[in-house]
Structures are given as C-alpha cells and as structure tokens.
Amino acid sequence: MPRRARTWGAIALVPALLVPFLPATAHAEQAPDTSRPERGPAVTSTDYPAGDTFHGSPGLPGEFTFSDNGVPTATDYYYGFNDDSCTTRLTPDEQGGSVTVTLTPRQEGPNWIYARTMDDSGRSSDCELVHSFLVAPLSGPVVHLAFDEGQGNRVVDAIDPQRGATLSDGVDWVRGRLGATENPGTNPTPRMNGTAVHLGVPMDGDPGTYGRVTADHPAVDTSGTFSVAAWVRLDRADADHTAVAQQGTRQSAFHLGYEGDTGRWVFEMSPEDGDGPLPWTAVTSTASAQVGVWTHLLGVHDSRTHEITLYVDGVEQGEAAHTGAWDAPGPLTVGRGLVQGVDDHHWPGSIDDVRVWDRVVLDHIVTDHEIETEVWRLANRPVAPEGRWTLDEYDGTVVADSTDHGLDATLHGDPLTAWNFAENGVTASPGVRLNGVDEYIATADPALRTDRSFSVAAWVRLDETGGAIDATALAQSGPTDSAFRLGHRGSDGRWTFTLTSDGGSGAGTTATSTAPARLGEWTHLVGVYDHTRKETILYVNGREEGRVAVTHAWHADGPVYIGAAREQGAISHHWNGDIDDVHAYQGVLNERDRDRVYMGEFPNIQV
C-alpha cells in the first residue's frame, strides 16, 4: 500500500510540472481571473481626521475624500455613515480617481465610515470600516445677541465682546422673554426675564424713523450650512416683517420672520444678490402666526442636502429644496431685511435672544446622557418666572408676587383664619389655610400663556375631610373654564394635573398619580405642559407620576386662582386645607429646576 501511494503521487505530479510550459493564452483560458478588490477605499479628511483627537461638532459639515487605496480599476465607491450598509454611491470622474463628499456628523464622540470598492468588472470588495474619528460636543453659536443690556444704543455679542450691534433711534428696551441681568439704570435689581429690543414701526410715517439693529459684521457664510434663531413678538401683522436677516448688496440672503400674504411664520432664502422678482425658497408655518405672543423661530440651511427647515416653538414646520445659496457679505440685521437695495420688511414688535450657528441645529439626541434635543431646549429652556406667591403673609388680603412682574393677588376669605395657621413642616415656611367652601386667592391678570409650554408648582396639604371632592390648588382661567387645574380628584383620591378642552365643559386630559394621595400630609406637586412634545406631565414629591399626550391646549386670559378653579362659568373646586409657595413659569422645568423649586428657590433662569 505505501508503494501504491507513492506511484499515484508520482503520476499526479506530471500535470503540475507541465503547467509552466503551457502558452500564456492557454493558461488564461483555463484559469480566468475571478479575484475582486481586496480592500475598500481609503478615506481622508482635514475637517474630521482619524485619530483620538476631537474635532468639529455635531451638525457641522466636513469634507471627506474617497480614493482607490491601491485598486486602480475602481469605478465606484459605496459607503455608509455610521452604518455598515455601504449603499450610498460615489463615482469618480475617471477610473481609479478620488471623490470628495460633504458629510455632517449627527452625534458627538466616535463616528464611523464603512465603504466598499467596485471595479470595472462589477466586482466589489467587502463592506468594511475605513475611517473612524471623534466629534467634539455641540459647538455654541458664532453670534449671540442676548439684548440684556436694558439701556443704551449698543449691544454686545456674547461670543465675542469686542463685537456687537448698534441700535438706531426708534429702538426701545422692554421686558424680554429670556435672560437675567442687572439694569444699573432706574431698576437696579435683577430682572428675572431680562430685556429685549422693541422696534417701533409707525403705521403711517417716515421710514427713517423705523427702528434698526445692525451688527458690526456678517454672522456666517450664508452659502454654507448655518442656523438662525430668535424669540419674537409681533405687535401687529399687516405686511411682510423680518426679525433677522443678513445683507448682501441688493438682497438679504435669508429672512426669518413673518409672511404677510399667508399670515404665517416664514424662513426664506433668496437665489441671488440681484434686483427684480426673484424665486425665493420659503418654508412657512403650518398654523397662522399669533400677534402679541412670544414665539421661538429657528431656521436651518443645510448645504449638504440643499434644504432649508423652519421650526416654530420647537416643532418642525417643513422643509424645502434650495440650490441657489450665496454668501451675503453684509452685516447681520435685526428687525428688517434688504430688498432690492432698500431696507424693508420692518419688524413691529419685540425681538430677544438672537443666535446664529455655522452648523445645523439638531433635532435629535446626540449623546447617550441627553434626554432632550437641541431644538427642544431652545424653545423650552431656560424657564421664565411669570409669578411666585410664597404665601408668607400674616395679615390682610394682599398676597405678594415675589417676581418682578408685580402680579399681586387678593385673598377672598377671612385673614384671621387664613394666615398664621398653616406651617409647612418640610420647608419650615408658613402658608395659607382655606376653608374648602368659598375661600380662594386670585390675581387680576393672567400669569402664563397656557397654549405654550409652561410649568406650575405648589406645596399642598389636603384635610382628611376634603378628600371626597375635587379640589384645585392652582389654576388659570378663561371666561367659563380654567385652562389647567393642578390638584386632587375626589372620585379615586389621586393627585391630578388637567389640561381642559376649550368650550366650558370642564372636560380635558389628565395626568394622574399612580397612588392615592396621603391626606393631611404636605405634598409637592408640579404640573408641566410641554407644547413642543404635546404632552402634560405630573410630578409628585419630585417623582414623575403621570404623562399623557394632549392636543387641545388653549390660552386662558383670565386670573390665576390659588385654591379654586373656574368650571362652566362658576368658581368651584375649592381647596380644603393648606397651600404654600406657588410657582408659575413659562417653559419646562427640568429635574434640577424642580429640585430647586421643591426647596423653595428659584430655578436657574440664566440663558
């Protein structure tokens, strides 16, 4: 057997020895080349180079170059950005050439590009990781006009204090939507809502008297990716009105503001810096703009996708394709735009907190430790104090507002039994005691826009004898009904936060505690309406107890009630027990804010 094995082995060697002596053509016919590219393309980037150093920011585009990586027959590269699908096609101008593409990271930390190479025979390499890089945390704006000076004709750019903007005649200072500052003028105490500029636009008058705010410089290259945001409030809406723009020679590159023809908010971009009718690209809001209401506007231009996007109060309104972006070399302007070489579209009203970025402001989570998007934060944070009643009075019927709004309230009840009996054992502060029959506290005017994001809080103690009926600790009312009620439901004994339907029926959507209330004990309640997410949330002693979707928030322009509510035209839901330290904020309280309010402090209201 061993000999037979060696014999077969010798015979088997014969063809192998002959192979080198076959003609080349015969060899090719017998063994065709079926190999495929061994590797994917090489990827390089000066904006986001590989390595362990952080670069750029989520939302900030960068250029990436794909090259053949030793495969001269490469005809196409297919890639996936942070996914290994390798389906997006790039085709070089010539075989084996390179292709440069602009990509925008959407997350901080590690990012990955997977790719494969296709050769001239249609064969592909494996889809593999070809480039990994680190993205720095979200970058701040490149321009930030907070308008917190409160006086004078000059405002500072918070990003670069050496720069800023100049205010013309016709610009006044008013209470702002955001910010905290000390006004060294007539009011030396901190203004909890900061200040804003108000631009006077006469109905019929000399355009030279229109208020103007003009920056020292352009904010961004408007041919590239950028975002622009502002808090705005219109006194009236009778024509096109521009809140923020950036000037070219004859046109502004973009306008963020109000469109008179449609009656809606708008973000629009011009196709060129020229005269005559131009085909502007515009995205308008889905609902009509409201006069007299602070509204957050955000416009985004993504040069990679050639799209513009508008957000109103944190809610995306739509997108539109825009391929004619150009760089406007003129200054950033607030309260007007440039139209065919003339200042126009003047803003009649107030503007606060103008910000411009050289990147996309993102509407998704970029890190694992975040719970809100950047778009959401701009529209809902920080909160603005609109009223706080500590209820520390010891006599009389006047209940002081601790904010600088001066929204004092009136006790409708007996001061001799209301004061000096309720003692909050948790915070060691006094409160008010109400009889559950006809006593309550009311302001003369509303504190909140109840159709925008708001948060309310109160310490409450409900007597055991009052647990069988509905009782409201805090509400804000319209003509027939309260827009919201924070309190207790007698039918099942649970804490509740209700947003009612507009119409006076008393019906609504309620976030409810998971367990019945413990009567006779001090309890801290927080109710939140998140207008961006369209949901209402109830917190009990700092813990989330209920969260429900809601679509019917409406504005109640009547008084704030402490210890009662209005339902079907009558004051009812009277509170039988004690209430202490009532807060009302525009915006959404986060966890840290709620902790501070729980301890009897103001939350962080700095921008």
Image: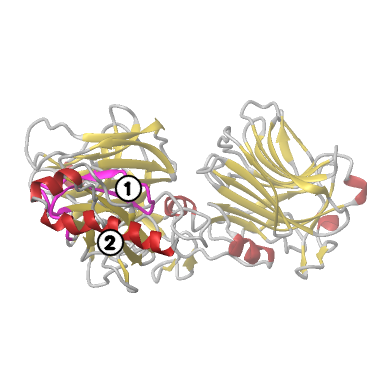
Q: Residue 50: where, in percent of width, then height? A: 29, 68
Name the magenta segment's main secondary structure.
loop
Find residue 143 and name its label.
2
Position of 288 with respect to 604 (left or right) is left
Quadrant assignment for the N terminus: bottom left
Q: Nearer the viewer, residue 379 or 457?
A: 379
Q: Is residue 87 magenta?
A: yes
Question: Which mark is nearer the camera, 1 or 2?
Answer: 1
Please name the colour scheme applied to the rendered image: secondary structure
The amino acid type found where label 1 is placed reads Cys
Position of 457 with respect to 110 (left or right) is right
First to last magenta residue range? 70-99
Q: Residue at x 21, y 44 (%)?
A: 254
Q: Of callouts 1 and 2, which one flags the residue occurring earlier in the amino acid sequence?
A: 1
For label 1, count other residues whose C-alpha is less than 10 Å away and answer few (under 14), some (14-19) or many (20+). Answer: many
* Residue ID for mark 1: 86
Task: Name above or below for residue 133 compared with residue 374.
Answer: below
Q: Could you say whether the residue bearing mark 2 is in a helix, strand or loop?
A: strand
Q: Nearer the viewer, residue 166 or 3?
A: 3
Which quadrant would residue 599 be assigned to in this image? bottom right
Find residue 460 and name its label.
none
Q: Is residue 528 magenta?
A: no
Position of 452 with respect to 269 (left or right) is right
For label 2, count other residues whose C-alpha is less than 10 Å away and answer few (under 14), some (14-19) or many (20+). Answer: many
The amino acid type found where label 2 is placed reads Val
